[in-house]
Amino acid sequence: MKASIIIGSTGLIGSKLHEILSSNPNQTKLHLISRKAPSNLSNKSIHIPIENGSYSIPSNINYAFCCLGTTMKKAGSKDAFRKVDFDMVVDFAQKAKAAGIERFAVVSSIGADPKSKNFYLKTKGQVEEELKEVGFTRLVIVRPSLLLGKRNERRIAEDIGKILYNIFSFLFIGPLKKYKGIKDEDVAKAMIALVEQGQGTLIAESNTLKLFSKEYDAKR
C-alpha cells in the first residue's frame, strides 16, 4: 500500500490525479498541498495548507506529483511566472527529496528547452534540468501538448486552442502527431504508471502518454 503527495492539486492535472488516486485501492493516503483545501477531498485525502509561502512534507510518502503551473497573463510578469513554474517546483522537489521521497513526477510542456528563445519553454526546460540534479531514484517528466479537460479557471488562449483543435484535429498525423491534444485523464494516468516503474529519468512526450495511460488501466 502506497502514499502520495500532490502539489497543484486544484489545477486540471492535479485534480484529475487526486480523483484517480482516490479510487486506487493501492493508495492509502493522499497529501494535497494548496492554499485552500480542495472541494473534492476524499476519505484518503489530507490537506497540507501553504501558510506564508511555507509548508512541510510528512515522512513515509512513496510518490510525489508536481502539477504546478501558471500563465504569463495570470502571473502578471516574467518574474512572477518564474516564481511559480521554476522556484516553487524546485522547492517542492527539494523538500520531497529531503523527506525521503525517491519517486517524483512533474508536468512540463511540449517543446520545453533550456535554450529556447521563448521564455515559457525556456523556463520549463530549465526546471527540467534542475530537477535532474535533485537525485531522485525515479524522475518522470511529462510534456503534454494542448490539454483537453475542464478547468476551474478560464484560460482564453487555451479555450481558443481547443476550438481550433476540434476543427483541425484531422491534420495532426505523421510528424504533427506529437502536437495532438491530450486528455487530462491520460496525462494523470501516465504519470502514475511511469513513476511506479523503473529507475532513472524518463521524459514522456505528449504522443506517448495515451499508451502509458492504457498501461495504467491494464494493471487495475
Image: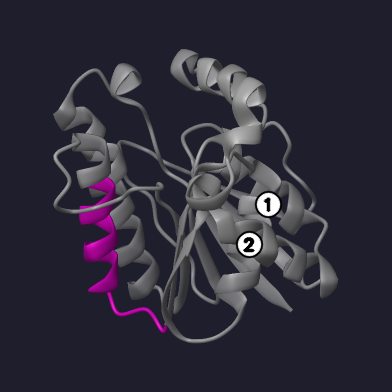
Q: Tell me if residue 138 can be seen.
A: yes
Please name the residue shown 56% across and 72% down the image: 195
Rendered position, 73 above or below 36 = above
Is residue 4 magenta-colored? no
The percent position of residue 126, horizontal first and vertical second, equals 20, 54
Image coordinates for residue 190, horizontal then vertical, percent: 63, 62
Q: Which residues are magenta?
A: 123-137
Name the kind of residue labelled 1 in the image.
Asp
Front residue of 196/57: it is 196
Instruction: Name the residue: 18% across, 54% down.
Output: 114
The residue carrying mark 1 is 186
- Comparing 147 with 65, the one in front is 147
The image quarter containing residue 131 is bottom left
Q: Are marks 2 and 1 in contact (CB under 8 Å)?
A: yes
Q: Quadrant of the C terminus?
A: bottom right
Q: Looking at the picture, does residue 129 appear above or below residue 72? A: below
Depth check: 6 or 214 in front?
214
What x and y, as percent, mark residue 153? 55, 19
Could you say whether the residue bearing mark 2 is in a helix, strand or loop? Answer: helix
